[in-house]
Amino acid sequence: MSENENLPIVALIGRPNVGKSTLFNRITKSRKALVDPTPGVTRDRHYDRVMWEDKGFILVDTGGIDDNPEDVLVHHIREQALMAIEEADIILFLMDGKEGITPADWEIVDLLRCTQKPVFHLVNKVDSPEREIELLSQFYELGVEDLWPVSAEHSFGFRTLMDGLCNSIVTSDATIDLPDETVKVAFFGRPNVGKSSIINMILGEERMVVSEVSGTTRDSVDTLVTRGKYSYFFIDTAGIRRKGKTKEKLEKFSILKSLAAMARCDVAVVLIDADEGITEQDTKVIGYVLDQGKGLIVLINKWDLLQGNKKRQEAVVGDVARLLPFVGFAPLLNVSAVTGYGIKRLFPTIGSVYRQYSATFPTSALNRLLIDAVDKHSPPIYKNKRLKFYYTSQIGTCPPKFVIMTNSYKGVHFSYERYLTNQFRDGLGLDKVPIKLIFKDKSGQRQDG
């Protein structure tokens, strides 16, 4: 999939206990990227990025996102369907082959007839060709063109479904010819936080727009920018918003659309409203940035509203630090889209973050750093043996990733891992980006650090 394309959102909807979670887990196992849970950041876990063959998408389990046991069942699933019809690019509607058609199924099928988006009507719990003949016949009453028999638990029909799903993902043939070393920067923010105003201030102030490129998602425009000898590709996301008719609990689904743009960027710029302070929604978006290992810059916009109020300024900055303790590496800038305050610091900060994000280091320097770190602070004892670290090397960038060979990766306690991470940060000058240490046994076992 082109790095300039947004990932489509695929929504999984259906009644409780029809097997949504099982199918979600089976589909996401095809995902190749490793994602570490980061403590201390609120996030919704009912989504995942999936790669199948050469197609990528973001799968969303709507049952996990909108789970209110007080809802009347039919009303509850109807809300899920309406939400998916509005926000998703492709819809997987899962029904229970053993239970048969229910009134809720009939209503959702009628709703889905109104959309122009691809819809897959899945009949779950069909685990053999014989069962397919037996269970599928009743679902033809629904009058839909295609039924997809699957067994989420036993994988019957799974490959056929995935191939069909990926065939429905339309990739653009248009490629954007970006200059070498272009830094791709995506801007994220809630409604009225001033995201568009910040971008307009940057573009208007610098008079440096080269071209505007139609975004691959609806209602977004990407802009190629040059400043001196450097090029930047600004991705203006439109996904984090609250619509008048949309209920608070449905807002989580809309946030996920920002993930599509996030997959394309090197550096994510997240705006926070100084007047309102940091919200749970802000922490979720920052959690997504960490999940995908992107560079991160946090902007506190509308700083002009707090001018002269030292106590409020300190409180806002303190709240950000308290709610985001595990992103202390991310630069935090106070800005104003209205007055232009702080805007000029943004480009040098983006450049600094990107240089660290894409940095490479010689193996000899890394091994000296590891030896010094171990000499300064001896590794702990594990199973009556002192942990040993033999050597290290860099295995990737964006963000920087390092493998450390040891006699037992299982013995690397979180506190010592954190110590080594800090030593690598300090020794390599990686103070503004996430880094990843992977501990691997010489015997060939491997475990994420």
Image (cartoon, rainbow, N blue to C red):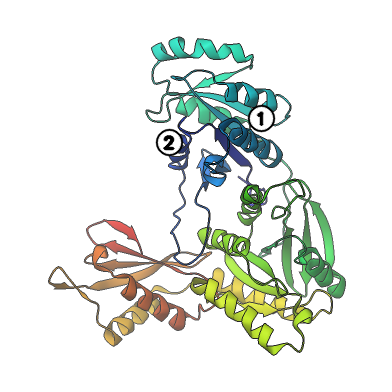
Which residue position holds label 1?
118
Residue shown at 14% from the left, 68% from the top: 383
Q: Considering depth in this image, is 117 or 164 the residue closer to the camera?
A: 117
Callout count: 2
Is residue 359 in sight in this rendering?
A: no
Estimate the x, y position of residue 436 in percent, counting from the top left: 43, 66
Estimate the x, y position of residue 226 in percent, counting from the top left: 78, 68
The amino acid type found where label 1 is placed reads Pro
Residue shown at 69% from the left, 55% from the top: 240
Image quadrant in which you'd find residue 125: top left
Q: Considering depth in this image, is 343 or 107 the residue closer to the camera?
A: 107
Q: Considering depth in this image, is 163 or 181 the residue closer to the camera?
A: 163
- Element carrying mark 2: helix
Please rate how many residues cluster around mark 2, counting C-alpha atoms within 10 Å: few if below 14, some from 14 to 19, many from 20: some
Is residue 31 in sight in this rendering?
A: yes
Decide if residue 130 is on the left or right side of residue 166.
left
Q: What quarter of the picture does the N terminus occupy?
A: top right
The amino acid type found where label 2 is placed reads Thr
- Element carrying mark 1: loop
Determine whether 336 is above or below 155 in the image.
Answer: below
